[in-house]
Image (tube, grey):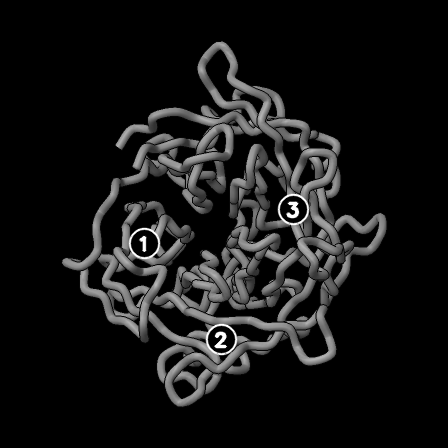
Amino acid sequence: MKRTGFALLEFNPTFNLSQKKALRDGLSGVVQRRKTLWVVNDETVSLERLTYQGTNAEGAHRYGEHTQFGLNDFLRLPVPPTLGASDIEEADIEGLDFRDDYLWLVGSHSLKRKQPEENKSAEENVKRLEKVSSDGNRFLLARIPLVEENGLPTLKKAVAQHDKRLTASQLSGDSASNDLMAALRQDEHLPPFFAIPSKDNGFDIEGLAVVSKRLFIGLRGPVLRGWAIILEVEPEEKDNDASTLKLKNIGPGHRPYRKHFLQLGGLGIRDLCVQDSDLLILTGPTMDLDGPVTLFRWPGGALPSSESLVFAKNLITVFQVPYGQGNLKGKDHAEGLTLFAPDGSTNRSVLIVYDSAAQSRTTRNNSVEADIFSL
């Protein structure tokens, strides 16, 4: 399907100075809130707010007035950034969503493997492929109050709103794990994949959707015999500590999660969003390769009554998303999805952002094009 429009996301270049790559080149999550888009680059420890600027001569919806919010100002990062340091322990945020005055976010919770480099010897590259590691801030599941200030949605660490106090809070954990991973270690399917890096079909979170008090967490991997997995959890404030979340027991056997298996043709989940009672599922390859990218609709998927196993015939293929092929091999990896309307009102379209954006998307200084598709 061809895009029906596009948004031009304009970034402030001064915020790129401490990054390995420009913010626009590695977008991994997006959510619209009124006239703002909130996006994240997976190699940072920050969130980026862009505000609607109208349309240009080409009909593009422009978003600018870039404001950056450091996660360390709101959350207890296991490995906070050091002033002046050239390297940071990235949070690898892969999912964003908004619900009930909170912006929710989730890290990948994954391991990574070093890649070979052309300027190194075969022996050196074989050694690089041996090295598996994890950034300490990846085990992050959190929410931050998002409230109106001077006419714009703004992050706050704590604020009184609607006769209640909103507080930034996160699931209990550290640089090696958190309560979600601890619970999943007793699972029947997932533990063998915890020691496997994300792009080797290891455990890898890459999608988030919030429905009332429940979170739906999409897994890029593992994919089990062609079946992708969505986890459903319900965080709540820990007793006497509003800044810490715990998981409510909602699953079989009083487990703090439910599992939903979906037959997505061997694809893993890249992002999720909710439309009415349905769940929209952006999918792509779990391995490090270019391949089919498809948007599926799971009718009623936002309100399941129990754990699920959903065959392909019960899913709707909405459209195919273009991906890098030929001269664009290795480019345009669709990673972020949000319902979209330019003025932030009724959503009749979706907006998709890309990691490793193709050069054709970045012809304007410090900007990148995001695609709009009609539903």
Residue placed at 68% from the left, 48% from the top?
46
Q: What residue type is labelled 3?
A: Leu
Q: Quick one: label 3 or label 1, which is nearer the N terminus?
A: 3
Q: Quick one: label 2 or label 1, which is nearer the N terminus?
A: 2
Q: Quick one: label 3 or label 2, which is nearer the N terminus?
A: 3
Residue placed at 36% from the left, 80% from the top?
189
Tags 2 and 1 in contact by the CB under 8 Å rule?
no
Mark sitting on residue 278: 1
Tags 3 and 1 in contact by the CB under 8 Å rule?
no
> Of residues 145 and 314, which is closer to you in this image?
145
Mark sitting on residue 195: 2
Instruction: Say which quadrant the N terminus sits in.
Output: top left
Q: What residue type is labelled 1?
A: Asp
User: Which residue was labeled with disc 3?
Assistant: 47
Horizontal side, residue 315 vs residue 289: left or right: left
- Residue 284 can be seen in this image: no
Q: Does dot 2 land on a helix, a strand or a loop?
A: loop
> Whole-percent x and y of residue 102?
61, 55
> Whole-percent x and y of residue 369?
48, 28
